[in-house]
Amino acid sequence: MKYVIVGVTSLVLVLAFVIGSNYYKEQQIQKYGFMAADNAELFVRDHSKTLGSDDAKVYLVEFMDPACETCAAFAPFVKQIMDKYPGKIKLVLRYAPFHDGADDFVKILEAAGMQGKYWETLNLMFETQNIWANHHNYQPQRLWDILPGAGVDIEQIKKDMHDPAIAKIIEQDMADVKTLNVQKTPGYFVNGKPLQTFGYRQLYELIQSELNAQYPN
């Protein structure tokens, strides 16, 4: 009888945990969905870089760091999804440079954007990340040798990256990171709904659910 009671108690505790966890996730989704509707600026700022149609009904917001290995790994996957549903998904990039020294790489990327080479530079940074940022072993001197491949003026980037406006962009994004409780990169939100369990399949399913909701036909 004693073992039965212990077993039943354990089962009840497990069920309570599962129910509580699911309830928490649902509350989080509802919370961020509400924030997306009424505080859209937390997800998309005027300075945010975007890719995709302005008519898209599904917004994929990614808090990223150009030196983040997982961000680089997910970039081709996100591109594949966007290519699969042309015109229906808009990618919004935000910054979350959590690691020491990562700010400088965001500044370099933004400075490249001043030359109209934002996406070319980001793609090149991701493709060569193992050379200049392998396992957070940042070696910016190697990056300077690589960046001409994106068609940028290196000396101009070295000047522009110190523009106070770029520092303000990072400051604002990090404030939104705190408000939205983003704790690691990449951090994803789809129409304001956070990716609760991280993974390729989970991200695809979250995007797919919003596509189904926004494009029922």
Image (cartoon, rainbow, N blue to C red):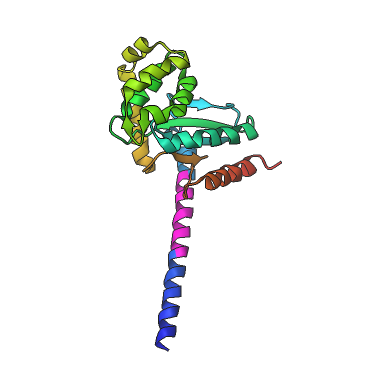
Q: Which residues are magenta?
A: 18-32
Instruction: Please state the horizontal and vertical placement of residue 7, each as a whole percent of the image.
Output: 44, 79
Magenta span has 14? Answer: no
Main SS, magenta region, reads: helix
In the drawing, does residue 49 fall left or right of residue 211?
left
Residue at the left extreme of this rendering: 100
Q: Which residue sits at x=37%, y=26%?
A: 106
Residue 206 vs residue 180, the one in the foreground: 206
Establish if 184 lies above or below 11: above
Establish if 20 lies above or below 159: below
Mark yes or no: residue 85 visible. Answer: no
Quadrant of image for the C terminus: top right
Residue 45 vs residue 83, the one in the foreground: 83
Residue 132 vs residue 184, the one in the foreground: 132
Establish if 163 lies above or below 187: above
Instruction: Please state the horizontal and vertical placement of residue 28, each as a whole percent of the image.
Output: 45, 50
Residue 99 vs residue 116, the one in the foreground: 99
In the drawing, does residue 138 fall left or right of residue 37?
left
Q: Give the number of marks.
A: 0
In the drawing, does residue 205 fall left or right of residue 193?
right
Q: Which residue sits at x=37%, y=44%?
A: 181
Residue at the right extreme of this rendering: 217
Q: Which residue sits at x=44%, y=69%?
A: 14
Establish if 50 lies above or below 73: above
Magenta span has 27? Answer: yes
Instruction: Please state the horizontal and vertical placement of residue 51, each as a whole percent of the image.
Output: 53, 26
